[in-house]
Amino acid sequence: MPNPVLAIVGRPNVGKSTIFNRLAGERISIVEDIPGVTRDRIYAQGEWMGRTFDIIDTGGIDIQDEPFMSQIKLQAQVAIEEADVILFITSVREGVTDADEHVARLLYRSGKPVILAVNKADNPEMRADVFDFYSLGLGQPYPLSGSHGLGLGDMLDAVIAEFPSSDELAEEEDIIKFCLIGRPNVGKSSLVNAILGEERVIVSEIAGTTRDAVDTSFEDDEGTRFRMIDTAGIRKKGKVSESTEKFSVMRSLRAIDRSDVVLMVLNAEEGIQEQDKKVAGYAHEAGKGILIIVNKWDKLEKDNNTMKEFETEIRDEFQYLSYAPILYVSAITKQRLSHIPDKIKDINASQTRRISSSLLNDVLMDAIARNPTPTDKGRRLKISYATQVAVKPPTFVLFVNEPELLHFSYERYIENQIRKNFEFDGTPFRVIARQKK
């Protein structure tokens, strides 16, 4: 079930990043008393009264900037389209400004719930000045001090009250959700159109054309239901210059978070680039099922060794994705596109597979018999028991005498033995060592 989303908006230097860090419980955004420090969109998770939610920190909206209206629209875009609730930050020190009024009118027309927070109300005299902010027409202003943590509780109570209920956020369990990620112009939009058999997304040779994530639901011939999320291309951080591209990066990461399976799309003509590995790393770290798609395969001049050589390069460059199957396709000729839904179903089955503790421990004991546990300074690792505790991704706990004795190389050996004996194609899984009590 996805978390509700809280977007933090406001003009520069009102303390958005300080409040973001307070809500996230750690120092994530750069906090400095200089307008415009927050340039990239950052997101994290927060929790209040047992409710977990995603937080988006945005850059400030400044009426002095050119072009002003385009910045207003871009900032509002992430708040309106991505958020369930918008936290509008103002500052009691400057009072109600023209920029505040512009943003307030925009947010009011959005129809989204807006919580108005008046920051930097560090003392009782300042707190008395917050009543001026009723003029923004967004209801009760909540005075708070981000730097001292004052007033956050009342403000968060108001935020939580506006979130959708858990039932509203629950998605259909029988739908397999997947997204396509990769650098701009690798052909993701063309793949979407080819898979669907109709022009649902604008296709262009200009990199970065697809700005937004487009959700599309469909069924295969066997009646399996899919939801496809086409994400905008992720560029190198240094290349993310336009505000719209910054939104695209955030949306791509959220699309990964929403998906069960991620299709990592490569361009056969360009080969593997450094940014491909970083993009795939997002999905791997998130524990998502992964299918590597090599698109534009029809454009290459091939011989009997081309596919084998390309696979060798992929396995060498993506060593952490050794579990991910590879498909060589063409969105233009539709070569092997029919295999994609079946592969997604197989990977989703691996993501949700559960292994009984008895079978798991039989495999574990056989593995230890063939390759005894390591020793360190006379102490030997003893593995007493193993059990699977989660899916998506599959997660296994080993109960051991001393967790620090489980060396990375032996952990990898155990992972390989589990993969050898059970079908976990296309999914990462986690092995956790816990001390036996």
Image (tube, rainbow, N blue to C red):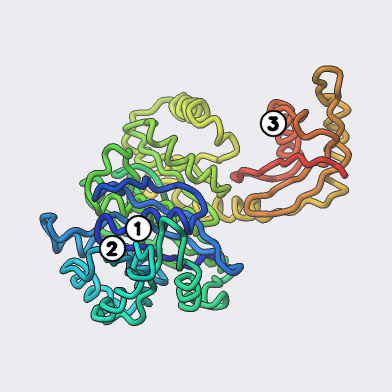
Q: Can residue 347 be seen in the rendering of this structure?
A: yes
Is residue 430 shown left or right of residue 435?
Answer: left
Position above or below: 310 against 191:
above
Residue 10 numbered tag? 2
Position above or below: 23 against 103:
above
Residue at position x 38%, y 42% in the image: 295
Residue 16 numbered tag? 1
Residue 9, picture quadrant? bottom left
Mark found first going from the N terminus, 3 or 1: 1
Is residue 84 shown left or right of residue 91?
Answer: right
Residue 322, picture quadrant? top right
Asked if marks 3 and 1 touch (Cβ < 8 Å), the reply is no
Q: Distance of mark 1 from mark 2, alpha carbons?
A: 7 Å
Q: Can residue 224 be seen in the rendering of this structure?
A: no
Mark found first going from the N terminus, 2 or 3: 2
Give the camera-side residue of 224 and 324.
324
